[in-house]
Image: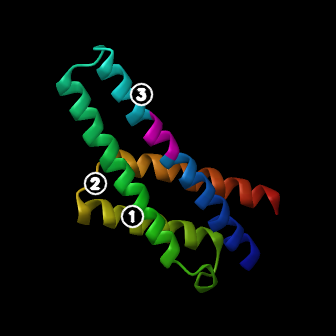
Amino acid sequence: MQGKKKRFIEILRIELDDLHDDIEALAEHCTELRRARELSEIGYWGNLGVLKNELRGVGVFAQIMNDADPDQYDSLESLAQDLEDRLLASIEKYGMVPAIDVLIRRKIDKVQKFVEEQS
């Protein structure tokens, strides 16, 4: 069981890095659209604000993961649930966009399913 939880954290960290890169790529794409005058200034700044807020959420969740000790949880499910609960609390505390919950929760669910199927 301990190996599953540690593997979950390791893989989730990779997925989180991938999500961070995807959000940065979207921000870059918005900049390109703005330069090409295919996106208005209002649209650009609105999108950029949301994307930066999502990046902040990824960073906050990375810290939550770093603070979590997989050995302190009875099961993979309890670890995943605690991470999700702490994410929701952080979204409210820091005023992050709710979309980050959906994005990160999908990663948690994906990795949890993968780890459970591999056992």
- Mark 3 Cα-neighbour bin, 10 Å: few <14, some 14–19, many ≥20: few
Q: Provide the residue designation for mark 1.
A: 60
Q: Position of residue 18 (x, y in %)?
A: 57, 47
Q: Amino acid at mark 2?
A: Met
- Compared with residue 68, is residue 10 higher up or lower down, i.e. above or below? above
**Cα separation between marks 3 and 1:** 24 Å
Magenta part of the protein: which range? 21-25
Badge 1 crowding class, 10 Å Cα cut-off, few under 14, some 14 to 19, many 20 or more, is some
* Element type where label 3 sits in the image: helix
For the question of whether residue 21 can be seen, the reply is yes
Location of residue 91 (image quadrant): bottom left
**Tags 2 and 3 in contact by the CB under 8 Å rule?**
no
Question: Given the image, on which type of amino acid does mark 1 rest?
Answer: Val
Residue, disc 2: 96
Is the residue under label 1 in contact with that under label 3 (CB below 8 Å)? no
* Distance between the alpha carbons at the discs numbered 1 and 2: 10 Å
Residue 46 occupies which quadrant of the picture? top left
Local crowd size for mark 2, using a 10 Å CA cut-off: few (<14), some (14–19), many (≥20): many
The residue depicted at 43 percent of the width and 56 percent of the height is: 58
- Residue 99 percent location from the top left of the image: 36, 45
What residue lies at 51% left-to-right and 67% top-to-bottom?
Answer: 81
Amino acid on which disc 3 is placed = His
